[in-house]
Image: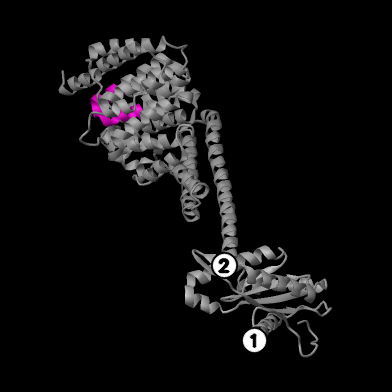
Amino acid sequence: MKPSSVLFLLKMMNPINSHSNLYDISLFTSIEQEMRSTLKKLIGDFIIADDSTRSEIEEQVIEIVVSAYSENCENPLYCEYVGLIIQYLLDYFLQIRTTHESEFYHFLNFLSHFPITQDSPYYSYIAKSAKEKQEKEQEYIELFNQLQLLYILTENGDYANAAEFLRILEPKVDINNLGLWILIQLSKAGVLRYQNQHRELLRTHLDLIIEIYNRDGSDCAINLIIRWLISIPWHKQGIIKKYLLLRMYDYLEEQKSLNSAMVLYELFTLEDRFVSSAEKIEYQRVLIKYPASVLNVQQLHSLYFFAGYYNCGVLSNFKDSIQNYQYSNYFLHKSWDSLLSLSHFMRDCLDPEHYYSAMPFLESRIRELSNQASLQNNAYVESLQANFYKIEELYEKVGELSLTDSLTGLRNRRYLEGNIFQMIVLAARHNVPVCFSMIDIDFFKLINDNYGHLVGDYVLKEIAAILSAEFRKSDVIVRYGGDEFLIILFDSDPNLSYSMMEELRNKIEVHTFEYQNLKINITISIGIACDFHKSNKPTNLSKCISFADQACYAAKTNGRNRVEIYKSEKQPENNC
């Protein structure tokens, strides 16, 4: 017995490996412990058995699985048994590190890029393999194209045509030509699954994995296990699939290989109930750093499309969202080219009758890609619209901030320039009187000098709060300068305005401003200028403010702590 086989048996008997325990799927199955132990031992024996006993062990495994459910590959119990078999196979193959990548492992990478024609960047590998056949070179190319077609029919879900081609092609290929033989076996597995030939399907997968391992190493065996895992209709047992994938990725993460890329992409495509959007974006960020050859254009399109949608809808990152949508659009275009190439290839390789019967399956892929294009366009428009609204909202907030005094929260002088004029015009049109009141804090400089600017700022904020509480919502209160406030009173004649300002002056005079342990009493001087002319002509805003300011200056000159109304020396033609 080989040393690696002995090591494997010891590990199967004593599962102390942290990776195995972390992703053990037995918790998600209804299969009893005794049956799990039996199946685990049989899989271990199957891997290390010689050719004479392997078939017998394989039959025991198949009998256990198929006798446990109603002979339906979509039965949940079938999925649980197959999940356990895959886990026990991984117990062995994940422990073995292949020292080199074989030529056949590269061939497995090409399967997601079919069809490989003379225009394909991967055609040189096929041409090289054909030349090695020397006198059979042309025959090899023709047979390879037929097998490509068979594999594509299976991938398209056209199992009726695939079954017919399989019967014709299977006798032509033996295991000595490993690349061609694997196309037969993978296509055969797809047809058997469709035909619900569960016994033969399970036998095909087990034979395929062990044969490839013996001939080409653990990397290729793991690749076939991944493909088997992907082909299973897990449905509600998707959590088993997730844990098997996580287990593989835990071992394969550092390799940045075809296998790890396949595992990551399958994790990325799991249903949302098994994998959150936050997990998916992390898988996406890792995958796009892989070599381009390990992913096909459809996969790259999906990765970038999701990133664009996620950056827009979740992160609100418009710049990255647009960039990802651009990449997605590029690979969507490439996907259409790939589909067109596939259609040409099928038309060239199929006779009219078979091509006609294959068309509905090809059309299904066209519809799917068309739906993706439509979804991408809708998502892009939604992204633009959502971000437009956010930008508009931010613009409004910025505008609001630019019109607001940061210390007091009142309007600032910029607000006057852009907003008050229209209000004044409207008031003049309806003959609504408007009064302007300029308020100045008496001896405010002494407060700053004696108590400091923090106390001065406190006084300004307190006065702003009093003003906001004292006047109507229709009135406009502006911090006009350092210690100056402007109040624009609509629908207020001189007498009413004077009364309101006198009341305000008195309220400030008796109010005690308390800052920490400091108590301060202050007074204010107020000047009023009113639009007292009955005219529908617009008020001269700057003049009105200037007149109110002059009246305020008069109040300060005449002793402070008083209210003065501006009186013009002559009656002007225009308002104010």
The residue lying at 36 percent from left, 45 percent from top is 292
- Which amino acid type is marked by label 1? Thr
Quarter of the image with the C terminus in it:
bottom right
For residue 122, which quarter of the picture? top left
| Separation of marks 2 and 1 at Cα, in angstroms | 25 Å
Badge 2 crowding class, 10 Å Cα cut-off, few under 14, some 14 to 19, many 20 or more, is: some
Image colouring: one colour
Place of residue 448 in the rendered image (x, y in percent of width and height, measured from the top left): 50, 75
Residue 174 visible here: no
Place of residue 432 in the rendered image (x, y in percent of width and height, measured from the top left): 81, 72
262 or 417, which is in the foreground?
417
Q: Which residue is mark 1?
A: 557
Q: Nearer the viewer, mark 2 or mark 1?
A: 2
Q: Check residue 436 for magenta coloring.
A: no
Q: Which residue is mark 2?
A: 513
For residue 19, which quarter of the picture? top left
Secondary structure category for the residue under label 1: helix
Residue 359 vertical placement versus 44 (above, below): below
Place of residue 543 in the rendered image (x, y in percent of width and height, measured from the top left): 70, 83
Badge 1 crowding class, 10 Å Cα cut-off, few under 14, some 14 to 19, many 20 or more, is: few
Quick check: marks 2 and 1 in contact, CB under 8 Å? no
Q: Which residues are magenta?
A: 209-226
- Which amino acid type is marked by label 2? Phe
Quarter of the image with the N terminus in it:
top left
